[in-house]
Image (tube, rainbow, N blue to C red):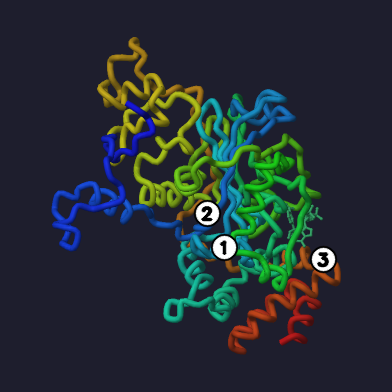
Amino acid sequence: MSNTNLTTSAGAPVGDDNNSISVGPRGPLTFDNHYLFEKLAHFNRERIPERVVHARGTGAYGHFTLSKSLSQYTIADFLQREGEKTEVFLRFSTVGGGQDSSDYARDPRGFAVKFYTRQGNYDVVGNNTPVFFLNDPIKFPDFIHSQKKNPQTNLPDPAAAFEFWANHPQSLHQMTILMSDRGIPLSYRHIHGFGSHTLSLWNEKGERYYVKWHFKTNQGIKTLTAEEAATKPAFGAQQDLVDAINRGDFPSWTVKIQIMTEAQAETYHLNPFDLTKVWPHKDFPLIEIGQLELNRNVQNYFAETEQSAFAPSNLVPGTGASPDKMLQARLLAYQDAHRYRVGVNHNQLPVNAPRCPVNHYQRDGAAAGCPFGHGNNGQGNQVQTSGTNYYPNDRAAQGYPAPNPAFKEPPLRLSHAVADRYDQLSEDYYSQAGDLFRLMTDDQKNQLTRNIAGGLKQANTSIQERMLVQFAKADPDYAARIKALL
Ligand code: NDP
């Protein structure tokens, strides 16, 4: 049969796709219009819930090429051999807007990298900023509510955004980056990426190292002022990335890491697991480890980019998380979001499917056994279909999967600690925001303070005063400039 026949979703050729069946040319439709019903019913279900944050995004495939073996720090297979390439999928995004919002919002940019390693997918799910607004996840829903649209007017609400920040000095560092000239990137090619969180690596001796990932753009940082951004089409950053890859102008990033030993983490004067703080380069220099290049656009935006499911819990042997409280929450929240949005078997979709055998005893659930992804994954395939579906079992000799103690993460040693709620109010949230302010040129300081004053003017005087106290603690000149503008 011709493969150009239009068919139903069940594969049956369709004779007429222009006319519904009606009782005479002027009469109502009949109940045997099942083909019409199929079309309408599927159309009604074309959308899945958009991400609550990072809804608007753009993804592309490429490669990470390792230039420095990390075998002294980790058993991670993809970090052993210099010159080895690992396929990646990278999704860029804005954070606060919906799927059809502008690419040019003043907003952090998501920078999520999925490394398809031979030992499973390793996801570094970060932003274009090395820090975040919060260091305790219990505040995340409130924070996002305050930054998204007003629930009554459905309009942006700068007063709410500043009310949250006035009550949370922990946000000052990230807010300074957001309001700076780097707050609106020219394109996704012209941003750095950061793993942001402190992650970890471990080697065959069972030694754990804490690590920060940095992806430094080889295209250079390029930004827009708010006035310039207002003239751009909403989809401009997506267009820029798709066009650059289509014309063979492949964007790339130099990949660097910072490394901290467990002993250093215990005594360093900053809490290395506080997501509102960087590790200063003078104490923890950047080590170049490779290049990341994007060189292939997606074939189908919905199937690949929209259904891509990044999760900080996608860790491979030789890598791990850290006590970073925000990261700990994301280990749960990201998988949970994908189960809700895409379904419990989201890792069977081609964009998410590991490029290695998948062997486990999980079964069933919506859309299990899809012909992509796990279809040819050997033992995994057998377990998913008719094989033994429990562990332990007596079938090791027949190749049924079993845990391998060589991949057990070393124990996490904690000094004597008491489980409680710790408010972190006495942390220093000002010095690093001040360091950043002092790095800026006069023009950058002007842009920063104008951007802040524009929003802060719309908040009440109590909020303005609390913000001025924060700016003054970071740098007296920071506060003075904003006060003059207010
Ligand atoms: P360094 O002088 O060694 O590093 C400063 C870093 O700041 C550089 O990576 C630079 O990156 C970046 N930077 C420069 N101008 C701006 C800007 N206007 N907006 C955002 N980033 C900028 O000092 P420290 O490591 O001690 O850090 C000082 C401050 O720099 C920090 O408090 C933090 O705000 C910021 N920063 C620090 C990073 C870190 O990991 N240590 C990473 C990014 C920012 P570039 O090459 O792009 O110019």
Is the C terminus in the top left, top right, bottom left or bottom right quadrant? bottom right
Hey, what amino acid is under mark 3?
A: Met
Tell me which numbered mark, 1 or 3, is placed earlier along the sequence.
Answer: 1
The residue that disc 2 covers is 325
The residue that disc 1 covers is 134
Secondary structure state at the residue bearing disc 3? loop
Q: Residue at x 55, y 74 (%)?
A: 164
Frontmost residue, 65 versus 262: 65
Picture coordinates of residue 89, whole percent (x, y): 57, 40
Hey, what amino acid is under mark 2?
A: Lys
Residue 431 visible in rendering: no
Q: Is residue 145 left or right of residue 105?
A: left
Cβ at disc 2 under 8 Å from ligand 1: no
Is disc 1 surrounded by few (<14), some (14 to 19) or many (20+) residues within 10 Å? many
Marks 2 and 1, how far apart in space?
10 Å
Q: For the view shown, which residue lies furthest in the bottom direction?
A: 461
Marks 1 and 3, how far apart in space?
23 Å
Q: Nearer the viewer, mark 2 or mark 3?
A: 3
Picture coordinates of residue 354, whole percent (x, y): 48, 31
Picture coordinates of residue 84, whole percent (x, y): 67, 25
Q: For the view shown, which residue lies furthest in the right direction?
A: 442
Picture coordinates of residue 311, whole percent (x, y): 49, 45
Q: Quadrant of residue 247?
A: top right
The residue that disc 3 covers is 440
Image height check: is 440 above or below 194?
below
Label 2–label 3 contact, CB within 8 A: no
